[in-house]
Image: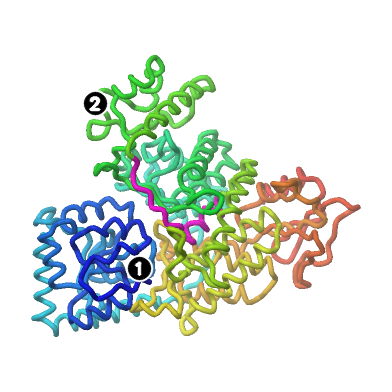
Amino acid sequence: MSTPSNTPSNQLADETSPYLLQHKDNPVHWRGWSDAALAAAQAADKPILLSVGYAACHWCHVMAQESFESAETAAVMNESFINIKVDREERPDLDALYQSALQMMGEHGGWPLTMFLTPAGEPFWGGTYFPPAPRYGRPGFPDVLRSVANAYREQKTQIAGNVASLRDGLAKMAQPPGGGQLSIEVLDSTATAMLRAIDPITGGTMGAPKFPQPTLFQYLWRAYRRTGSPLYRDAVTLTLDHMCQGGIYDHLGGGFARYSTDEVWLAPHFEKMLYDNALLIELLSDVWLETRSPLYETRVRETIAWALREMRAGDDTAPAFVSAYDADSEGEEGKFYVWSEAEIDDLLGEASALFKHTYDVGPHGNWEGKTILNRSDDLSLGDDAAEASLAASRDVLLDARSSRIWPGRDDKVLADWNGLMIAALARAAVVFSEPSWLQAAIAAYDFVLGEMSDGERLYHSWCAGKAAHPGVLEDYANMARAALALHEVTGEQDYLTQARTWVQTADQHHWDADHGGYFMSADDTADILLRTKPIHDNATPPGNGIMADVLAQLYYLSGKLFYRERLDALITALVPEETDRSIHQLSLLMGFETLERAVQIVIAGDAPADAAMPGGLVRTALLAAPPTRLVMRLSNDLSLPQSHPAFGKASIDGKPTAYICVGTTCTLPLTDPEELKAQLLEM
């Protein structure tokens, strides 16, 4: 946390966040969030203007250009407010708190978040983007500033009432009533309810804008695997087909944009986020195992190639993944990514005809006079000769594009988002037999463990060689899940031990001992008004949802009853009595499914994996088992607890031997990988 002086000036130059540094030359007297900034507000008895955004946020840039770079607007801000800038990716706990406050005011959340606080950090009014003059049905920002400043001076009683009401409401939000119970029937009915929201034409949820929502579609895929209903399967594959061929996908460089502004996946909001791509890599890999879609494999390979090429923090000394690429370059959204027909003709020559036909290139473009490359007219790939020609053309265009002015890159390394990518790479490495992806996952994991840890505690972010900001629940949950993914693939016990350590830290510092559930902020995070409790799925799954899956896995992998009891308490505290509201907690429901329907594959005496990847029975188990699988290896003198149904079972005739255990029973010994595969697929 920064500790700026009390001298009126812009104090962001010493920050490491790329977003905050974007504002270091504003005439606004910005400060980072700090005890000193709050103290300055209290000393001057001025309200706080809190502005929250992130480096890749288009409307954050717009408001900065229109208002924060204006000397006139800055003068009003500096005279009447203590102005604080927060990178929502550095401090997701602060963002979650004040987004919740805004929603309690009846406003839609989003970024830039513009909140007005008392000197103690208590919210009393706010909004998101404000134009410099009245338009879009919104007041002009200078008028807002003067009105709020006047209200703070003249309407103390009313503001105190707003503060008290919001604070009470926020405290209640941190203590959801809970009391619900889960069952497989609830999971099935929730999946059925989610189908009603799916667009039957182009997939995704109905209407615009359309977000990828990989957690939702992972849930539907698991419902298909559980029930066999083609309705769930088709909802997932329809969505993935359109996304993989639509404009939301970068057909030259790889990777998916954050969302589509329309309902046909054509026009993206061009920013690329690490978390979307990590979650989609994992989803596509899982779905490919059944469909064997060449399209899905191609998109996984291209997206991972993009991540390894463009999203690494540095060389071998910093092999973790950075956060995002901006939507804007040269002040225009999407300029880096779009094309004219003339440009493509000039670059491709005779090859341009096939390329233009395939990628929807015409003289008038398909978006604001330019062309967003897409293949939405044909959801399948072409024959080998056509695809080879198109690949050569894409290489030419990608090379030409690389000479353009690039969008800004947010170089922050975030522990939670890296956890998502590590797990995705570990899974995809096994699915597609790519040892280098596993090594990339291990390298990123080692970086977080080595450079973003202080004993058993995690830092949330790392940038410019410096780890900073206290770890939040999502850091511990996602990194524990990443450790379990690496343990699953490699069999190394250190990963399992570290996962248990991170869960222990979360239990010590984040668990709500009075009401149950995990708070986002740790108990020693002193600079936040109230601790929120993330329970709903958003662009990323909440820490409580991920922790549910981690606890379920640890219960079976360790045999420790504590993990089951903790998960039971989590469900009791967070699941509402009205089961139809569970549609907002899909990640938590998937953790419950792992607990209830775990398929444990115990492999005794398995031959050591080769230098890079597992083989034999282990590989078969990883690829053929249901999503609720737990793979346990009994080599290297490891043994199961006496309570485990496979306790005492051993290899047969010196051969690696597998036992499939569900509940309290196990199959007869299996030594043939094909026989193991057949039995697992029957499940």
Residue with the most extreme right position: 653
Label 2: how many Cα within 10 Å (few below 14, some 14–19, many 20+): few
Q: Secondary structure at mark 2?
A: loop
- Compared to residue 264, the image places residue 229 above or below, namely below
What segment carries the magenta color? Answer: 406-424
> Which residue type carries mark 2?
His
Residue position for label 1: 96
Label 1: how many Cα within 10 Å (few below 14, some 14–19, many 20+): some
Q: Position of residue 139 (x, y in %)?
A: 11, 60
Tell which of 17 and 175 is nearer to you: 17
- Residue drawn at (19%, 63%), measured in percent from left and top? 28
- Residue drawn at (21%, 83%), measured in percent from left and top? 43
Q: Position of residue 72 (x, y in %)?
A: 10, 60
Q: Which mark is residue 469?
A: none
> Which residue type carries mark 1?
Ala
- Magenta segment includes 420: yes
Note whether residue 577 is visible: no
- Compared to residue 592, the image places residue 509 above or below, namely below
- Magenta segment includes 517: no
In the displayed structure, does residue 119 sit left or right of residue 592?
left
